[in-house]
Image (cartoon, rainbow, N blue to C red):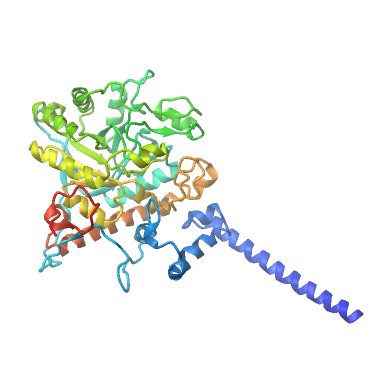
Amino acid sequence: MMPMMDLLAQVLQVMAIIALMIALFLAGVYVHDVTQKRHTILRNFPVVGHFRYFATHWGEYMRQYQYLPDWEERPFNRLERNWVGRSAKGESNLISFGSEASPAFAFRNAPFPVLDEEKHGFPGKLIGVAEGPGSSTPYLAKSFFNVSGMSYGALSSAAVLALSQGAKAAGIWMATGEGGLSSYHLEGGADIIMQIGTAKYGVRNADGTLSEERLREIAAHPQVKMFEVKLAQGAKPGKGGILPGHKVTAEIAAIRGIPEGQDSISPNRHLDIGNIHELGAFVQRVRRVTGRPVGVKFVAGQPGFLDDWMTDCALHPEHCPDYIHIDGGEGGTGAAPAALADYVGMPITQALPLVVAARERHGLQERIRIFSAGKLITPDKVAWALCMGADFVVSARGFMFALGCIQAMKCGSGRCPTGVTASEKKLIAGLDPADKSVRVMHYAQRLREEVEIIAHSCGLKDPSEFTEAHVTAIERGVGGFRNQVA
C-alpha cells in the first residue's frame, strides 16, 4: 500500500511543479504583455490576446480549410486589412504564387515604363486663390493622400495624438472631424483642416449659431490651414453626427460647447444653410473671417444639384468653395442608423465621376480642387480615384487600421479593444501614441510609394499625370466610369 501512496505523492508533486511552472510562465507572459507597447491588444488583454495573433498568423496557412475566403469579409476584407497592417509595420507586401484579388478595374500599363531616373514625386497642388473674389491664404498640399475627418470623442485622445504625430512625420494633413479642434490635434504638429459640422462644434455660440470670435481664435493657430463646411458624410447623409452620452466627457463637452454626459446629436443639416445661395454665403463668411481656404464636404444624391451649384460658383466667385470633398455612400462612421449606412448615398464609383464632370462643364478645374473618400485605403483604389479626376484622396478607416483597429465594430460602445475609439481609460492606455504614430507614417508612405509604382508602370512620371485613359473597367457593376473602353 505504501509504494502506491508514495507513487501518488510523487505524481502529485510533479503535477504541482508543472502547475507552478505554468503559473510562472503565464505570470511572465502577463508582465511582458502589460509592459510592452507595440501590441495594444496584448496590453489591454494580456495572455488571452495571444490567441488572436496566433489565429492571425497561422490562419494564413489554413485558408484552404476555411469556408470564408480572404476577400469576402465586410466592410473591409482580410486582403485589404492585412495590406494596411503590413505597410504600417514596415513589413513587406510582396506576394507569391498569384493574385487573390478580383479587381473591378485594371490600369493600362505602358509598353515603356518610366525609368527610376525619370520619375519624380508628387509636385503638390495649391488649394485656394490669393487674389480676386473668394481670395484667402492658399495652402500648398504636398501629398495626394491624407487623413480624413475623425472627431475627438469618436476617437480616443491617444488615437488623435498618434494620428497627428504620424501625419506630421509623413508630411500630410489631417481633418478634425465635426467634433472640433482639440489639444491632441495641435500637440502632434500636423497641418489641420478644421471641420464645421451641422452643430458647429467648437465654433458655436450658446444658441448653436456660428461664432466668428471662435473662428478667429481657431484660425490663429498656424497649424490650421483650411476650414471645411460639412453638409453630410457618406455613412449617414441626411443625419447629423451622433456621439453617445457616455462618450461626452467634461473635456469633450468643453471643446464642443455642449452639456456633459448627454447624447451629442447634430441637426441633420445646418440651420442657416437651406439652399445653394446660403451655402455660398456661408463659405464666403468663413473665408472672410479666417483668411483660410474653405471647402465643402457632401454626399452625391440628386445630380441636378451639382450643375446648379457649379453655375452659382461661376456666377458668384466669392461663393465658390476652394475644394469639394465628395464622400461615397460606403463611408465610415462611429454611429449611424443602418438604413442610412446601407442604402442612402451614391457610391464613390458613381459619385466621383459625376462631380468631376460637373466641374469640367463649368470650367472650374483650376478653381475647385476635389477630395475623394469612401473605402479608398489601398493603392489601387487611390490610383483609381486620381485617374477619375480627384486631386486628393483622404481616408479615415485606413488610418484606423494603421493604428491597430481590428474591425471589431464596437466604435460607438466605448469598448473598442484596441483603444482607437475607446472611452474607457484602461483601454485607451493600451494604445501608445509614440509607437502607433510611426505606423501611421509608414502606412501613408507605403501607399504613396505604391501609387507611384502604378503611375510609373503606366508611363507617368508622377501620380498627378493620371487620367481616365489609364484605367478601364473589367467587370459590370462598377458604375460611374466615363471611359469603359476595353
Picture residue at 38% right of the left edge, 41% below the top: 333
Residue 212, horizontal then vertical, whole percent: 28, 22
Confirm whether residue 275 shows in the render.
yes
Picture residue at 32% right of the left edge, 56% below the top: 443
Picture residue at 32% right of the left edge, 66% below the top: 100
Q: Quadrant of the N terminus?
A: bottom right
Q: How many marks?
A: 0
Confirm whether residue 150 shows in the render.
no
Q: Is 113 left or right of 258, judged from the image as shown?
A: left
Residue 21, horizontal then vertical, whole percent: 68, 69
Q: Is 304 left or right of 421, judged from the image as shown?
A: left
Q: Quadrant of the C terminus?
A: bottom left
Residue positioned most to the top: 207
Residue 415, horizontal then vertical, whole percent: 52, 44
Q: Is 269 left or right of 385, judged from the image as shown?
A: right
Nearer-the-camera pick, 42 or 455: 455
Picture residue at 26% right of the left edge, 33% below the top: 227
Residue positioned most to the front: 476
Compared to residue 54, the image places residue 272 above or below, namely above
Residue 401, horizontal then vertical, whole percent: 39, 52
Quarter of the image where one finds residue 318? top left
